[in-house]
Image: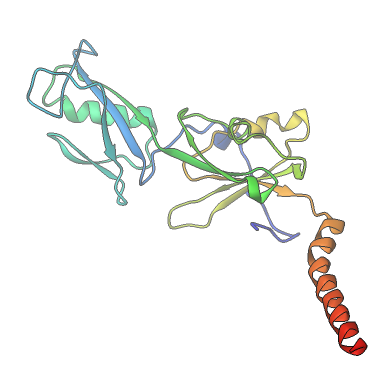
Amino acid sequence: MLKTPKDYTYDKLSDSIVKQDYRIAANDAIQYRLFTNDGFKLIDLASTSNIFANNIDVLVETDGTIKMPMVGFVNIAGLTLREAEKLLEEKYSEFYVKPFITVRVVNKRVIVFPGNGGLARVLTLSNNNTTVLEAIANAGGITDDGKAYKVKLIRNNVGGKPQVFLMDLSKIDGLVAGNTRVSSNDIIYVEPRYKLARTIATEVTPLITLISTALILYTLVVKK
């Protein structure tokens, strides 16, 4: 699966992509906290009681907006977390003195194929700046059947062609590529080694069993 032709042109892994901050995407679950006076007091946006809320969660809609108390819909898709915080602080400055907002994504997921399809995992990452190497490590590392020198980072772009970056993590020089920060819904695919003997055994064994069974039945019929 996820094979590329021999003459496939991979996307260039530039320094700007390696160090790119996480950008908010549709279906991200956003957890935010709002304080007044640059963080002096936590504001409870969920009720009118005197009980302060620690966390408030909102979902980024498919159109890239979130529905916020008092200010309505705000488009934050494509923004970094700091950019989203700054935008929301501007929105709430109409209602509060020097609002201070913190934002984080709580459901960011990546899919890791570590070199053996049976060990594929969907990882929920709490660190918004998780790297490719960290994601692979969280999945248990590259298996013995995986090619560490042929690791693909597949990045889905909404409405566009996916980007495919090729990494060689078998050498220390691959550390720079391995430190690329992953985005939500990225796929990390470690190409498995093709084992001819195992493939032949898997495909030929059922045929041999069928022939052997047929010969046994034939022998029993002839003896009668």
**Above or below, comparing residue 180 to residue 7 in the picture:** above
Quadrant hosting residue 143: top right
Q: Position of residue 72 (x, y in %)?
A: 16, 40
**Residue at 87 percent of width and 83 percent of height:** 220
**Residue at 76 percent of width and 44 percent of height:** 147
Q: In the rendered view, does 221 fall on the left or right side of 115?
A: right
Q: In the rendered view, does 41 fall on the left or right side of 16?
A: left
**Above or below, comparing residue 137 to residue 221 in the picture:** above
Q: Position of residue 98 (x, y in %)?
A: 19, 17
**Above or below, comparing residue 194 to residue 149 in the picture:** below
Q: Nearer the viewer, residue 177 or 109?
A: 109
Q: Position of residue 103 (x, y in %)?
A: 33, 28
The mark tally for this picture is 0
**Residue at 8 percent of width and 22 percent of height:** 49
The quadrant of the picture occupied by the N terminus is bottom right
Question: Residue most toward the top?
Answer: 40
Question: Residue most toward the left?
Answer: 48
**Residue at 74 percent of width and 49 percent of height:** 192
Q: In the rendered view, does 197 fall on the left or right side of 94?
A: right
Quadrant hosting residue 179: top right
